[in-house]
Amino acid sequence: MAKKNDKPAPRVIEGQLNAQGMRFAIVAGRFNELIVDKLVQGALDSIRRHGGNDHEVTLVWVPGAFEIPVAARKLCESRKYDAVICLGAVVRGNTPHFDYVAGEAAKGIAQAGLGTGVPCIFGVLTTETLEQAIERAGTKMGNKGFDAATTAIDMVDVLRKL
């Protein structure tokens, strides 16, 4: 029995990590493919570990991170996928090119998701060095592709409950 001063608890909605029956698209930038392939493998591993199947995944390779948003938007608009997972690697060089590519990739991926209502997950590494990218693609820092797919699974479930 609730006490007179007790306040009711809020209704909590959160995702469950069960990918069974979910359909995903992965958009992967071929630039820095050695790194990105490891991110893709991590994403597929997460989907499998959470009950999803490879036949429910479409993998689209694009030239680089800058091209990811347009493909992601097209996939979101198709309504064939519950979520789009965007994977790439942008490593800073000695020119401002990094800032343009990383910023536009982030903005475009966000716009694809917001504009369509389909979760569009940002799994693009933006690192200072190649070593940092390697660390985030399956060594010291885990696999950010795995993390991105896990986020996609969570978001699909949350949106289904809203």
Image: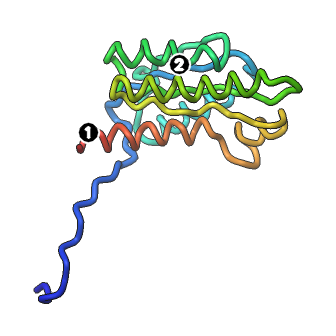
Indicate the quadrant where residue 153 lies.
top left
Q: In which quarter of the image is the N terminus?
A: bottom left
Q: Name the residue under label 2.
A: 69
Q: Which amino acid does label 2 sit on?
A: Pro
Residue 39 disc label: none
Say whether disc 1 or disc 2 marks the residue closer to the N-terminus. Answer: 2
Q: In which quarter of the image is the C terminus?
A: top left
Residue at position x 12%, y 88% from top? 4
Residue at position x 80%, y 24% from top? 96
Q: Name the residue under label 1.
A: 160
Q: On the picture, is 129 further left or further right than 102?
A: right
Report the mark closest to the observer, 1 or 2. Answer: 2
> Within 10 Å of the Cα at label 2, are there few (<14), some (14-19), or many (20+) other Cα atoms?
many
Please tell me whether mark 2 sits on a helix, a strand or a loop. helix
Where does the image place residue 83, in percent across and percent down from the top left?
40, 28
Indicate the quadrant where residue 18 lies.
top left
Residue at position x 67%, y 46% from top? 142
Where does the image place residue 95, in percent across and percent down from the top left?
85, 23
